[in-house]
Image: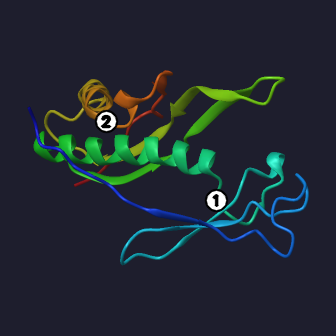
Amino acid sequence: MGALHSYAATVRWTGAGQTGTTTYTAYSRDHDVALAGRPTIPGSADPAFRGDPGRYSPEELFVASLSQCHMLWFLHLASAAGVVVRDYTDEVTGTMRVESAGAGQFTDVTLHPHVVVDDGPGVSEAAVAEIHRRAHDHCFLARSVNFPVLLEPAPLRTHAA
C-alpha cells in the first residue's frame, strides 16, 4: 500500500442574515473556505443558483483544480525529462448538466494548455504530447472523477534557449 495523505478545510456559511433559510430566496449562498495558515477563499453558489458573481463557486474551483493537478504533474515530468518549460497557461472549460429535478453532474472537463519550452535536442510536439499523456495518467484528481477529462493542448511554442 502506498502513502496516505489527508486534507482538511473549514467551510463556514456566512449568509444567514437575519432570517436564515426561512425561504429559498431569504438567504445568501456566501461562505468562506479556510485552510490553515492561508488566505480565505470567498465562496458562493454559481450566479445561476442565486450566488454572488464576485465570489468563487465550487464548480469553478473544481474545474480549476483539475487543471492545477495536470499542470503540476506536467511540470514535474517535463523537468524529469530535461524539457525546460518557460510558460504554462491553461484555458480549462467544464460542462455540467443539471436535470429538471435539480440534480446534476459534470459531463466533461477539457484542458487547453498553452506551453512554451526551450528549444533543444529531443524537444518536439510528440515528446511534449507524451509528457501531457503521462501527466494525465498520473493526475490524482483526473483519476478520481467519473467523467472524461479531455486534453486539447495548443500547438507547442518554443523559446530560444
Frontmost residue, 29 versus 142: 29
Residue situated in front as seen by the camera: 2 or 136: 2
Query: Is the C terminus in the top left, top right, bottom left or bottom right quadrant?
Result: bottom left
- The reply to whether residue 158 is in sight is no
x 55%, y 51%: residue = 61
Measured from the top left, where is residue 131 in percent x and y? 25, 32
Label 1: which residue? Answer: 56
The answer to whether the residue labelled 2 contacts the one labelled 1, judged by CB atoms less than 8 Å apart, is: no
Label 2 and label 1: CA atoms lie apart by 23 Å
Side (left or right) of 111 relative to 30: left
What type is the residue that disc 1 sits on?
Tyr
Residue 133, x across and y down, in percent: 30, 25
118, above or below 97, in the image: below
Residue 139 - label: 2
Q: Quadrant of the N terminus?
A: top left
Q: Earlier in the sequence, mark 2 or mark 1?
A: 1
